[in-house]
Amino acid sequence: MENYQIDKYVQDGQDAKVVEKIHGKILDMLTPGESINYIALQKKPAVNLLPDSITVSNKRIFLCEFTKLGLATNFEIFPWQDIKDIAFKEEIFGSKVTVIPFTGENLTIDYIPKTQARKLYQLIKDALANLQNQKKEAKDTKIVIENKPAFNTPSPAIEKPEPIKTIEPENPIAKTPELPKVEERPRFEERPSLNSTFANQNFQSNNTRQEPQGFQSSVPSPSPSVSTPSDKKDEEEDEITLKLKKLKGLYDKQLITQAEYETKKAEILSQL
């Protein structure tokens, strides 16, 4: 059974005894779910009983170097996520394969047969591409999960009431408050002029003194007497006094203004 497992790793000219020795060592280092995919052995032109090798699993890459005549073995192990790239260069006696990690120095194993180097390069490139796809899918899945709500239970749709539209007039006119009506009153009452007042009084006095025509008094008229200068002066003083009293009465009744009263009073007094 063990020989059958080793046979699939010696199809490209690998030394079966060396493959068997390396295979046994790596089996002890595999993790659960990890399996060996390919083993490439170094083949120098000179006699090389313990060549270096590169082993590829579905999770990691193992670089093996025998030391101290095969009594000790040095391993450089890299998970796929720590490997940046792989390169190989074909030379006259085989190919030089270089593993390029993200951190640290590059590791190179020379004299790998060209057929094994090509197959090794193809397997490592495929593994790195699968790793990139897995990272991308995990990132997309994470974004989708974060965008999903915590609960998928549909909530009943609540219809929003339509807003009430208010129609405003195109040209609104601001209404001014109406002021209470105030009845206009004349500032002062029209008063008859002083000249018209005296004319009316003289007209009334003349009418009362005139007797109606065709009426003859039965009382005999007094005989005319001769007027003296003193009597004439007394009559003028009585007439002036009467005018002043009438003028004062008009002013007291507010029928004339004070200015008119003073003016007319001065005219009457000037007749003395």
Image (cartoon, rainbow, N blue to C red):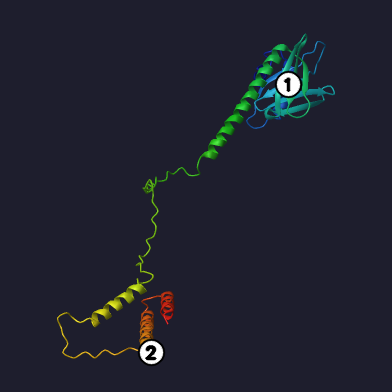
| Quarter of the figure with the C terminus | bottom left
User: Considering depth in this image, is 42 or 10 the residue closer to the camera?
Assistant: 42
Task: Locate residue 120, reporting x and y percent.
Answer: 69, 18
Residue at image point 77% right, 19% down: 109
Task: Locate residue 240, reporting x and y percent.
Answer: 38, 83
User: Considering depth in this image, is 131 or 6 the residue closer to the camera?
Assistant: 131
Q: Secondary structure at mark 1?
A: strand
**In the figure, is residue 203 to the left or right of 22?**
left
User: Considering depth in this image, is 270 or 103 the residue closer to the camera?
Assistant: 270
**In the figure, is residue 191 to the left or right of 14?**
left
The residue positioned farthest toward the top in the image shown: 92
Q: Which mark is residue 230?
A: 2
The amino acid type found where label 2 is placed reads Ser
Mark 1 to mark 2 CA distance (whole Å):
174 Å
Residue under circle 1?
A: 54
Regarding residue 179, the answer to whether it shows in the image is yes
The residue positioned farthest toward the left in the image shown: 214
How many residues crowd around disc 2 within 10 Å: few (fewer than 14), some, or many (20 or more)?
Answer: few
Task: Locate residue 208, reporting x and y percent.
Answer: 24, 82
Q: Secondary structure at mark 2?
A: helix
Q: Which mark is residue 180?
A: none
